Image: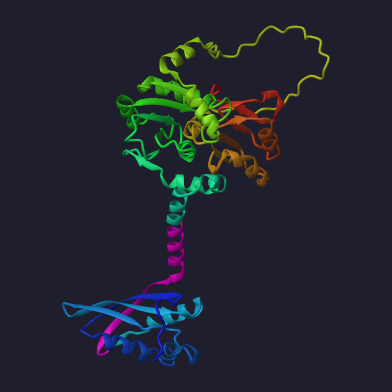
Amino acid sequence: MAKISPVSAKYIVHATIEIDGVVDKPDVIGAIFGQTEGLLGADLELRELQRSGRIGRIEVNVDTRTGKTHGSIVVPSSLDKAETSIVGAALEIIQRIGPCNAKIKVTKIEDVRVSKRRFVIERAKELLKDLMDNVMPDSQELADEVAYSVRVMEIIEYSRERLPAGPNIDESDEIIVVEGRADVLNLLKHGIKNAIAINGTNIPAAIIELSKKKIVTAFVDGDRGGRLILKELMTVAEMDYVTRAPDGKEVEEITKKEIHKALRSRVSVEQAKLDFSREPVAPKRRDFRPEPRRPPMPSRGPPPRKFAKMRLTNDEKTKFRSMLEDLIGTRGAYILDNKLSILGKVPFTELASTLKSLSTGVYAIVFDGVVDRNITIVAERTSVSYLVAMSTKVKDTETRCTLLTVDDL
């Protein structure tokens, strides 16, 4: 009798069996062949399928305890999906084995090729890492793209707070504190393995403890969000040095040259605090009071356009502020409907393309970034009422959308 090798099987039927009595393996196998005979027609007769090698050897494992028998059945198959499913279902019609009542239940049909693909992927990763360790210097340009995936494998989760960090965070005497996971990955990509992310707006306890034992450099984005996080870090943790990405850029997107330039230009935390103290303080917001009318100044150009703006409610203000705080350091964007429910979250770099694919139904967008002219144009076409961001390069009179920043909230 021919039999199929487990290596050549495409699918494996797994089933459980429960018998109210004591039986042996041959009794189970005999019942399977005997009670399915003639049930599925000549093309799916189990004996013929096994003889031709399309069904392999049926494995039965049974265990008898307290007068009852329990076990498992494994059927390898090289049939197609539909035929294998029919054979599996046919097992469940067996209700008696010998003199005993029995119940067979198919638990799953395993696609052997899936596990083989999984093995191929894992093995390919190992081979790729070995290849990268031995790559020749003159081949470095060819390996730049795959090097990033190898670095990603090195990222760890530090402390109970599961902070993204490089593999040398414990061994190194100096560490670099960044804002998010993407920043750690970019530093790993360029060989810096002692970075750790705060992963949010609140400074984790693990960062505070590390700052007491190690020399710490805070490396934040070159935007308003980075300045806010930097101020909080200097307040609650024992920072030693401070540096920032170039203005308007983020740590996750800057090049190797820009990273090393920023780290070489780091300043002591005392100097950073002194620089902050010299910054002009923004005037406090005051309640609006009508001012006396003044005669209009002559103007050579056309008057600025006026748009009807949405009036912000207290509930909207609270939710916008909370969502914006959640997004600090993530470079993400929330897309909201008119009930302030989140329709989706996308990376900021994909925001414009996502809005272009949506014709209606978007009420507000909250994102960790800067409002520019391109975003306002796309938002106006989608009839967006609110754009909520860290800062803006667009004047309120230049768009129909209502613009809100951290200062407004």
**Residue 338 falls left or right of residue 211:** right
- Identified at 36% across, 31% down, the residue is 204
Q: Is residue 199 above or below residue 22?
A: above
365 or 73: nearer the eye? 73
Determine if the magenta segment contains residue 101: yes
- Identified at 67% across, 33% down, the residue is 376
- Identified at 44% across, 14% down, the residue is 273
Q: Where does the image place residue 186, in percent across and percent down from the top left?
A: 49, 38
Range shown magenta: 98-124
Is residue 311 visible from the viewing direction of this image? no
Is residue 256 visible from the viewing direction of this image? yes
Position of the N terminus by quadrant: bottom left
Q: Quadrant of residue 283?
A: top right
**Residue 270 falls left or right of residue 358:** left
Q: Where does the image place residue 94, in percent across and percent down from the top left?
A: 35, 85
**Residue 248 falls left or right of residue 58:** right
Q: Is residue 129 above or below residue 321?
A: below
Determine if the magenta segment contains residue 199: no
Q: Quadrant of residue 105?
A: bottom left
- Identified at 78% across, 9% down, the residue is 297
Q: Where does the image place residue 251, in percent across and percent down from the top left?
A: 51, 32
